[in-house]
Image: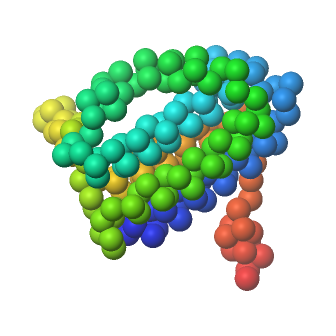
Amino acid sequence: MDGDEILQRARRQRHTTLSLADQVKEDRWRAPVMPGGATLHDVLAHILAWDEWAVGVFELSHLRDEVPPALARALDDVDGFNARAQARLRNITRDDMLSSLQTISDRIVKSSLAVGGEDWAKRRLPGLTFAVGGSDMRPPRQVTPSVGGVLRMLTEHEEEHAGEIAAAFGVSVQREDEAQQVSGK
């Protein structure tokens, strides 16, 4: 998947997430009906926080030799990061949450493209490591992700949550590209 495809997929997913969340009325926004007893607000707060994290990683990684340790540590304690994000964003309104998710999406694109020219998606992020692979026979190996790899990870993460939102609230979105396929255009 090249850089343009990564960005298009991320944009489509954000549109889907926002469209699903916008269908949930404010009186159900903080109902603990998501997996694990989470609220829609909680789920969107941690999506927003990871987007903010990505912007920080992308912008600071091209100013420094490596990602600052504080940003790298977020990956060591994902649950703690999510809990702190949910607490920090607890009082943000429904409309401000939706607006923030829309705005941060544009900022992620800008910070992704800021360095690297045509190969921006391949730019590595020294100081970050992810465990990948692994099986019963082999332990996972640590890799330094690329900007594109982080964007793909965030998009896949958001896609999972969008499915949970759709299921928990009985809402759906038919994207334009799907509608064209259905209608035969």
Please say whether residue 134 is visible from this viewpoint.
Answer: no
Provide residue 43's location: percent of width, then percent of height. 61, 30
Vertical placement of 19 versus 119: above or below?
above
Colour scheme of this structure image? rainbow
* Snapshot quadrant of residue 31: top right
- Picture residue at 26% right of the left edge, 30% below the top: 69
Foreground residue, 29 or 94? 94
- Judge from the rendering whether residue 164 lies leftward or rightward of residue 156; answer left or right: right
Residue 133: percent from left, percent from top: 23, 42
Residue farthest to the left? Answer: 138
Instruction: Please indicate whether residue 98 sits to the left or right of residue 151 in the image.
Output: right
Can you say whether 91 is above or below 65 in the image? above
Relative side of 138 to 185, left or right:
left
Q: Is residue 33 left or right of residue 131?
A: right
Foreground pick, 64 / 144: 64
Point out the image quarter for the N terminus: bottom left
Q: Is residue 11 above or below residue 60?
A: below
Q: Residue 101: percent from the left, percent from the top?
A: 63, 43
Q: Residue at 71% of width from left, 44% of height from top?
A: 99
Of the 4 image quadrants, the one containing the C terminus is bottom right
Q: Residue at x 71, y 41 (%)?
A: 98
List the single residue furthest toward the bottom. 185
Which residue is more in the foreground, 140 or 76?
A: 76
Q: Residue at x 53, y 56 (%)?
A: 10
Q: Residue furthest front?
A: 63
Q: Is residue 13 visible?
A: yes
Q: Position of residue 41 (x, y in %)?
A: 68, 27
Number of callouts in the render?
0
Q: In the picture, residue 167 is in which quadrant?
A: top right
